[in-house]
Image (cartoon, rainbow, N blue to C red):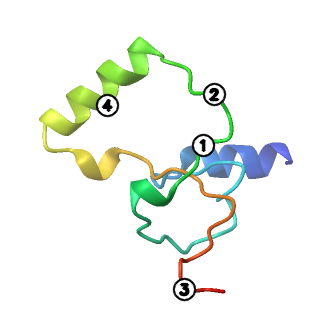
Amino acid sequence: MSSSQTSSACSSNEPSSIHSASIEEIYDIPMKDINRPLPSVLDENKVQSLMETIQTMESNRVPPIDVLWYEATNSG
């Protein structure tokens, strides 16, 4: 990523990541359908930040998670 791409990505108000930077579609996927192949890491600062954001009714500021692959149950 060039420095101009980095600065424009960082200045945007929209959440972005390496996976979703060029993908504008967002889908609602049930949490029960998401497998996490990597072990989770408990970061108390992130947990506290998330709790504060949700409690202040600013849940629209919580960035969506990146899902790299999803197969619907009826997709064959």
Q: Secondary structure at mark 2?
A: loop
Question: Where does the C terminus fall, quadrant-wise?
Answer: bottom right
Q: Are marks 4 and 3 in contact (CB under 8 Å)?
A: no
Using the numbered discs, state the Cα–Cα distance from disc 3 to disc 2 in whole angstroms: 28 Å
Q: Which residue is mark 1?
A: 36
The image quarter in which residue 68 lies: bottom right
Q: Are marks 3 and 1 in contact (CB under 8 Å)?
A: no
**Element under label 4?**
helix
Residue reaching furthest to the left: 56
The mark nearer the N terminus, 3 or 2, is 2
Residue sitting at x 52%, y 52%: 12
Sort mark 3 into few (<14), some (14-19) or many (20+) by Cα contacts within 10 Å. Answer: few
Is there CB contact under 8 Å for labels 2 and 1? Answer: yes
Alpha carbon distance from label 2 to label 1: 7 Å
Labelled disc at residue 39: 2
Q: Residue at x 32, y 24 (%)?
A: 49
CA gap, disc 3 and disc 1: 21 Å
Amino acid type at mark 4? Leu
Residue type at mark 3 is Asn
* Alpha carbon separation for disc pair 4 and 3: 33 Å
The image shows residue 48, relative to residue 31, as above or below, that is: above
* Mark 1 residue type: Arg
- State the separation of the CA atoms marked 1 and 4: 19 Å
Amino acid type of the residue tagged 2 in the rendering: Pro
Q: Name the secondary structure under disc 3.
A: loop
Q: Nearer the viewer, residue 73 or 8?
A: 73
Q: Dot 4 corresponds to which residue?
A: 50
Residue at mark 3? 74
Disc with the residue nearer the chain's start (1 vs 4) = 1
